[in-house]
Amino acid sequence: MDSNSLHAAQASILYTLRHATRARYSELLRPTNLEGDRFKYHLATLLRKKLVFKAIDGVYELTAEGKEFANRIDESTGREIAGPKASMLLVVRSHKDGFTHYLAHRRTREPFRDYWGIASAPMLRGLPVRDSAGRELKKQTGIVADFAVVGMQRLIDTLPSGVVLEDKLFTLLLAEVDDLPPVHEWYGGESVWLTRQELLAKDRLFHTTQVSLDMIEQGRSFSEEVCVYDKSDY
């Protein structure tokens, strides 16, 4: 259920059950100041959405899904509490002929079209992060590799006015591979092997790129930064 479509009466029912655990019909009705039929509609909506259920003794409770949903709602606004988006940064490194190469990635879609950096991917719900990373790397490049979690990186993208464009919490992962495995084409971007110097010399470069490489090379496990973009960049 989308919190943006949540009626105030439905939010009231969720709040009441969140704090009381179990409540009777009259206890749920009272805070809403609604007439019976209007209240019944909103209660029925929550029952249909399987966020609330009616126990054998006639008392109402939150379902497991309802508890999780109610826990994300700000009681002062009735909207979902905004938080960082969970993503992954997939650093793939290879040592060959005395040089260290990184698998660099160029975006071919908006936003940030033609920006260079490290491959990224959303964290897959219900799947361990290392499994998510391996699956996404194979999908994007065809390369099979085992990842290790090496850190966390938070990046807040803003406009010069201070408006937040994105707030992202990255799990930083590293995979070491032999030689320089060939990379297949992918509709979301282009991936090529580059040295650190070649990658960092790109004109349109994600700020996270040097930070990620520095974290790995210096053994740092956490970074948090605000990055300001012009509207034309985004």
Image: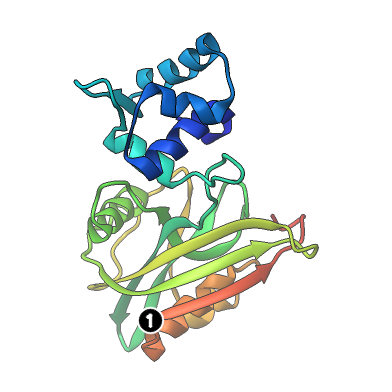
105 over 136 or under it: above or below = below
Asked if one can make out residue 203 in the rendered structure from this viewpoint, the answer is no
Residue 150 lies, in percent from the top left, at 32, 76
- SS state under label 1: loop
Name the residue at 38% across, 37% down: 17
Residue 35 vertical position relative to residue 76 in the rendered view, above or below: above
Q: Is residue 215 visible?
A: yes
Q: Residues within 10 Å of mark 1 (few under 14, many from 20)?
A: some
Reading the image, the residue beneath label 1 is 221
Figure label count? 1
Name the residue: 61% across, 43% down: 77
Residue name at image x 53 percent, y 58 percent: 106
13, 219: nearer the viewer: 13
Rendered-image quadrant of the N terminus: top left
Rendering colour mode: rainbow
- x and y, in percent, of residue 229 in the image: 71, 64
Location of residue 22 by image quarter: top left
Percent x, y of residue 32: 56, 27
| Residue 79 relative to residue 194: left or right | right
| Identity of the residue drawn at 22% across and 73% down | 178
| 158 versus 22 height, above or below | below
- In this rendering, would 19 be left or right of 200? left
Circle 1: residue type = Ser
Residue found farthest to the right:
161
